[in-house]
Image (cartoon, rainbow, N blue to C red):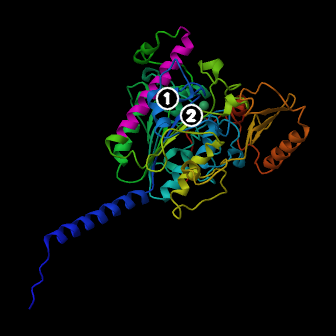
Amino acid sequence: MNKIVVNPIYIILLCLVITACQSNQKSTEKISTPPNLVLILADDLGYADVGFNGCQDIPTPNIDRIAKEGVKFTNAYVTWAACGPSRAGMLTGRYQDRFGFSRNPLFAPNDPNQGLPLSELMLSEALQQAGYKSAIMGKWHLGAHPSQRPLQRGFNDFFGFLTGGHKYFPEEWTLADEYEVTSQYEAYKTKLLRNDQRIEETEYLTDALSREAVNYIGQYKDQPFFIYLSYNAPHGPLQATEKYLKRFEDIKDKKRRTYAAMVSAVDDGVGLVLQQLKDLNLEENTIVVFLSDNGGPSHRNGSNNAPLRGRKGQLFEGGIRVPFALRWPSQISSNQVYEPTISSLDIFVTMVAQNQGKIQLKNELDGVDLLPYLKGTKEGAPHETLFWTFTDRAEIAVRHQANKLIMGDSLPQLYNLEADIGETTNIAMEQPGLQKDLVAKQQEWLSQMAEPAFLGLLQNKEYDKLHSDRFKRPVIKD
Ligand code: CA
């Protein structure tokens, strides 16, 4: 019998080929793993109050890293000019007006209809179907009734508070639970919740939320996860610790100084989250998104929306166009500035697209998958047309391409945002045909929307009269 002699060099080559195949397989596996999502929402942050949008007096190096290592959006919108409905749109991928969430919800733990209807599929619920674990830390604002809380809406963990805002210092959290609340804003003083339990917390609120985000990333690291870091900063009340205030001794205006300190605390938190992703080797396949839920209420918290006109609560750009950055190293290149129009609605759809076949949608979506646009495989704007309402449709705005029409109590206002980002020159009189077209678009869109499903913040007194039991512990029937 002939003995087969194998040249050792072939064995070495074979080993190299096997190793290459294995590592190739590994990288394929990595890409086929759905991405994690870390969604960082600031509250009432001005358009101009992050470094990546040119802020000079408040350094935000960590938030800026998201934009630098990914993409910054210059025409990014939220779906409402204030807190609750903006969140409802972002977390369902649908105009919240479609399901009547067109008022800022009241804190009413007794009322199952005061919040996000169960007919809607939330991002956390969609991702749960795809095997994700989700945690929210911070502001919920989508319903305080036990049937509407985060753990009932696809989140595995919750650390935070249920209403639209909160005090920042632990010594002011004097109410044991929501049933001790006797008026709308007293809910700002409840002890924090961890899941269903009220807890004792000793840290400044923003720092506590950042700490929890870091911890949950650590806990969830072995399967796809969604971290919703829903800071209430820099929403009022304006409260900051000495640690952060000391950084801004040069700012003489007290309001702006405290605001700057609060933003700086958020930036520190973002830094801790990014470091945790790096330490756990999760950077490549984690989408990090940073945005604000609406524009800055500059008259209240010292925020700055320049060069945009207006502020929170208005349909001028300062109310609805927000600082927005996204990083996803394995898929999109760094240092991008993306100018076409996008929306907070797109976060939901982008995530669904990464989990195709695993998510059973309930309703029609209004967002767009951003990935092909950011990779450059799809051209044009993700949205040709976007719509907004305010104060029960007393005001309605549409942006179609560069033109934006605001209809309300005063004369129609038409602006070309490419030529006039500050909405200074009303061209409605010069462009009657365009105005007519845009009014028709508004009406067509409005005809698809629902009536408001609940009384909101502006009807607080009326609601009190109708629901004297609003803060009572609800009786839950099996
Ligand atoms: Ca807000």
Query: For mark 1, what is the residue?
Result: 190
Q: In the figure, 322 relative to 347: above or below?
A: above
Query: For mark 2, what is the residue?
Result: 163
* Crowd band around label 2 with a 10 angstrom C-alpha radius: few (<14), some (14–19), many (20+): many
Q: Please tell me in which quadrant of the rendered image residue 255 appears.
A: top right
Quarter of the image where the C terminus is located: bottom right
Q: Is residue 371 left or right of residue 367?
A: left
Q: Position of residue 143 (x, y in %)?
A: 59, 41
Highlighted magenta segment, given as a residue range = 252-276
Instruction: Specify the amino acid type for callout 2.
Output: Thr
Q: In the figure, 40 relative to 411: above or below?
A: below
Q: Secondary structure at mark 2?
A: loop
Query: Is there any visible trace of residue 458 in the rendered image?
Result: yes
Cβ atoms under marks 1 and 2 closer than 8 Å = yes
Quarter of the image where the N terminus is located: bottom left
What's the mark number on residue 208?
none
Frontmost residue, 109 versus 224: 224
